[in-house]
Amino acid sequence: MKDRFMLLLYMASVLILTSVHDVLFLSFFLLSLLLISGRDIFALLKKSFISVIFFNFTISISYIIFCLLKNEEWLSYVVLLNIRVFTLTFLTFLFVSKINIFKAVSFSKTLQYLLTLSYSQILTYRRSFEDFSLSLKSRLIQKPDRKDAYTFVSRVFSYFFKKSLENSREISQAMRSRGFFID
């Protein structure tokens, strides 16, 4: 029951964070989350920062350049965007660390089934990526040069793309046979 309540609280929080455009409110919300996180604060901060740094940097720089070319004000929007994205990311990591998502969706067999499918895909892909990384390390004596790294990334991407297409067909067929798509 606690997990279901936390899921509802999480969804309400996401709705609030995406609706409110006040930097002070978002900052206060983030501060509250930091206090709630307890001992996990540094691990969650690190995960959140690593997760959003590329996205936030790319979007922020692009928006700043766009606004400078148009001679428009950019600071308030960039601050709002970065605080919102970081707060939502931190909230998500905090949520995942505090509850059992499988118990939270136990009220619906369909949601449990979809969550199980998604989770198994994530674990399979994570394991495959770790295997690819270890195979690259085992075959090279020294650090790979740029060409080798690009080749590795392109082949891994190609593998995951093909694997995703194959899995989507199989999962779709399995879901159809269980009555998920009633046309």
Image (spheres, rainbow, N blue to C red):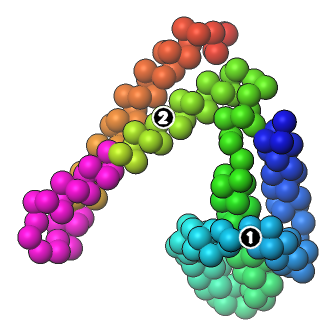
Mark closer to the observer (2, 1):
1
Residue 13 falls in image quadrant = bottom right
Residue stretch rendered in magenta on the structure: 128-150
Check disc 2: other Cα within 10 Å, few if <14, some if 14-19, many if 20+.
few
In front: 147, or 74?
147
In front: 109, or 154?
109
Residue 64 falls in image quadrant = bottom right
**Mark 1, residue position:** 38
In which quadrant will I find the N terminus? top right
> Is residue 145 located in the magenta-colored stretch of the structure?
yes
Who's the residue at 67% across and 52% down the image? 96
Looking at the image, how many numbered discs can be counted on the residues?
2
Compared to residue 105, the image places residue 2 above or below, namely below
> Is residue 179 located in the magenta-colored stretch of the structure?
no
Who's the residue at 74% across and 70% down the image? 38
**Mark 2, residue position:** 120
Q: Amino acid at mark 2?
A: Ser
Residue 5 falls in image quadrant = top right
Q: Is residue 29 left or right of residue 147?
A: right
In which quadrant will I find the C terminus? top right
Asked if the residue at tag 1 contacts the one at tag 2, i.e. Cβ–Cβ closer than 8 Å, the answer is no
Check disc 1: other Cα within 10 Å, few if <14, some if 14-19, many if 20+.
few
